[in-house]
Image (cartoon, rainbow, N blue to C red):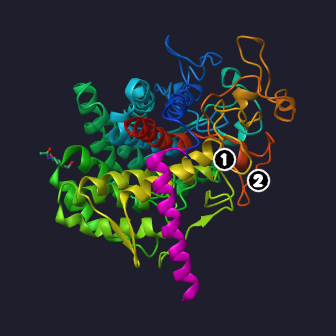
Amino acid sequence: MSSSSSSTLNVIMHVRCFTLCFLILSCSAFTSQDYSEALEKSIIFFEGQRSGRLPPNQRLMWRGDSGLSDGSTNHVDLVGGYYDAGDNVKFGLPMAFTTTLLAWSVIEFGNSMQNQLENAKEAVRWGTDYLLKAATATPATLYVQVGDPNMDHRCWERPEDMDTPRNVYKVSPQNPGSDVAAETAAALAAASIVFKDSDPPYSKKLLNTAMKVFDFADRYRGAYSDSLGSVVCPFYCSYSGYHDELLWGASWIHRASENASYLAYIQSNGVTLGADEDDYSFCWDNKRAGTKVLLSKGFLELNIQEFQQYKVHSDNYICSLIPGSPNFQAQYTPGGLFYKGSESNLQYVTTSSFLILTYAKYLNSIGGVISCGTSTVTSENLVALAKKQVDYILGENPSKMSYMVGFGQRYPPRIHHRGSSLPCVHDHSAHIGCGDGFRYLYAASPDPNVLVGAIVGGPDNRDHFLNDRNNYQQSEPATYINAPFVGVLAFFSQELTAV
Ligand SMILES: *[C@@H]1O[C@H](CO)[C@@H](O)[C@H](O)[C@H]1NC(C)=O
């Protein structure tokens, strides 16, 4: 078809232009210092999401201790971990996914993090310390959530003031949750790689627990939404089922342990990852695209022949993002932003940018290229593709607005985040009750506490951003939006310095 071949040409020209820009840098909107600053801020954000007792080296000073008796109703210590987004619930599935992606960021791009490496590892550890607590009673139980989300969402309260029920939710052999359990195993296994050299005992504990939790996930199969639907849906319902998490969990344990029994598991269960059923929306729910890229490394860098099909799957995934490819299926806004859906779209932008860069790295290590139909895509092309998305998020977009809070001249002043929008406990120590906080939600004034580094849901498919605190689809930050971006920013902070 003529239209398709002319758009193929456009893409090649487009990609060439980006590559050129990338190499000569004169048309780059941001310097390596800018990316370094964004990297630092992207990690500070996680301090704003901390639950539990804050350590002396806490840098985001407006936060205080919270959730100090989490787990006590069940006589278990579940203090710590992260609030997922703008509320005060600790949801296990997105927390585990966040931790996996933070760990993956360190694994792939830790070498580029320079003075931010320790901060990134602390962000991983804040997640894994909690996940280890959640797994103390496995295989009898895995704790997967603290806080009743329906009660929580009826309030607009600071985490430090929380007085809603801190109910504890769990999965068990009778009420299984292979999705949340296998994601927890993935997080623990990925983190074991992060701490392998710097803290071997901790790393070993993470890997052993990952294996135990994975066995629990695989042995007692089921979706956690079946038993916990009233408190995990519609927030973090397991829409994609649990097969994707099982394969993802096994893949991480294989990468961390090189244990052949996980290789065998991947080989006998890998068919569930076929291209047909994949819409490539890599996120807290759907791990398929991430697993494909993760396993492609086994073929590209380690020459594990059994993983060749994942290189093919990954190529298909990448081509789906490139306009003009025969299997092109992505959508871009007029301003060039990858667009997947109206709720927290930037989560898909950060996860796909991470996968693109990671795949570029694997490809580059063998000097490989991808064929998308008749066009050839190099790792430089992929870097350019990711850079376009990163620069858009940081402010190079039609609204001339940074979607990272606290970065650049203009960023969202009213985000959908309880702690950020209410006066902080140090300025206003008196309790602000459940319903009393809503006037801050609806206030037009800017957030009194800047949640530095938070990336919000982002603009719509026409590049429009409605600057309204109650518009959670566009204005809410989330840990899983930031987690892969930590790795992405590390790459660009270093790459440009090196040129
Ligand atoms: C490999 O993993 C399996 C399953 O977890 C375990 O039973 C076995 O002991 C492991 N082998 C080694 C060498 O660690």
Q: Which residues are magenta?
A: 1-26
Residue 136 lies, in percent from the top left, at: 37, 32
Assign a secondary structure to mark 2. loop
The residue identified by callout 1 is 457
Q: Nearer the viewer, residue 393 or 304?
A: 393
Residue 220 quadrant: bottom left
Mark 1 residue element: loop
Q: Which mark is residue 69?
A: none
Indicate the position of residue 152 as horizontal and vertical percent values: 70, 36
Q: Looking at the image, is 499 positioned above or below residue 258?
A: above
**CA neighbours of label 2 inside 10 A, class few (<14), some (14 to 19), many (20+):** some
| Between discs 1 and 2, the one toward the N terminus | 1
The location of residue 367, given as percent across then percent down, is 26, 58
* Camera-nearest residue between 97 and 397: 397
- Total labels: the figure holds 2
Q: Is residue 95 magenta?
A: no
Tell me if residue 275 comes above or below residue 219 in the rendering. Answer: below
Please rate how many residues cluster around mark 1, counting C-alpha atoms within 10 Å: few if below 14, some from 14 to 19, many from 20: many
What's the residue type where badge 2 is placed?
His
In the rendered structure, which amino acid carries the disc numbered 1? Gly
Q: Is residue 137 visible?
A: no
Q: Are marks 1 and 2 in contact (CB under 8 Å)?
A: no
Q: Quadrant location of residue 437? A: top right
Evaluate whether residue 426 shows in this view: yes
The residue that disc 2 covers is 464
